[in-house]
Amino acid sequence: MTDDSTAPTKRRIGPMIARLLLGLVFFVFGLNGFLHFIPQPKELPEGVASLMGAFIKSGYMFPFVFGTQLLVGVLLLLNRFVPLALVLLAPVLLHILLFHIFLEPKGLPPGVVATLLELYLAWSYRDAFRPLLKTRTQPN
C-alpha cells in the first residue's frame, strides 16, 4: 500500500520550480534592460548590430520588450496571473529562439531551456488554456 497523501504536493513542486526559475530569468533580464548591470559584448555580428540599431531607433521596442519581460518575471515570481504571464511570454520566447537561430547561434541553449520551461508550465496550467483553444465560441 502506498501513501498518496503527498501526491498533490509532489505535482506542485515541479511547476513551482519551473515558474520561479523562469520568473527569475525574465525579472533579471527585464530589469537589466533598464538598469544595464549585465555587461554587453563589445563586438556584435553585423546582423545583430543592425537589428539592435533598428530597435534603438524605433524608440519604443526595447522598453516594450524589456517591460514585458519585467512584468512577466514579476507575475511568475509572485504566482499571480500565471497563465496570462505565459501568454505574454510566448512571443518573446519565439523572438529569442529565432534571433539565436538566425543571428547568434551561440546563445541558443538558454533560449531553448527557457522555452522548455514555458512549455512545461503551459502544460501544467493547461486547464486555464482550454477555453482559448476552442475552434468556435460565442460572446457572452
Image: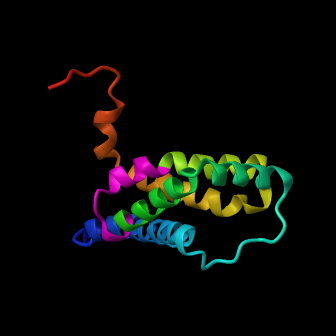
Residue at the extreme left of the image, as rendered:
140
Residue 13 among those drawn in magenta: no
Seen in the image, is 80 located left or right of residue 36?
left
Seen in the image, is 57 located left or right of residue 119?
right
75 up-or-down from 49: above or below: below
Residue at figure coordinates x 45%, y 56% from the top left: 68
Residue 82 among those drawn in magenta: yes
Residue at figure coordinates x 25%, y 68% from the top left: 4
Q: Main secondary structure of the magenta part?
A: helix
Model colouring:
rainbow
Residue at figure coordinates x 55%, y 69% from the top left: 29
Magenta-tinted stretch: 76-89
Quadrant occupied by the N terminus: bottom left
Residue 45 is situated, as x and y percent measured from the top left of the image, at: 84, 57
129 up-or-down from 43: above or below: above
Quadrant occupied by the C terminus: top left
Q: Nearer the viewer, residue 44 or 127?
A: 44
State the count of labels.
Answer: 0
Q: Nearer the viewer, residue 128 or 95?
A: 95
Residue 88 is situated, as x and y percent measured from the top left of the image, at: 43, 49
Residue at figure coordinates x 32%, y 27% from the top left: 134
Residue 99 is situated, as x and y percent measured from the top left of the image, at: 70, 50
User: In the figure, residue 133 lies in which quadrant?
Assistant: top left
Residue 35 is situated, as x and y percent measured from the top left of the image, at: 54, 75
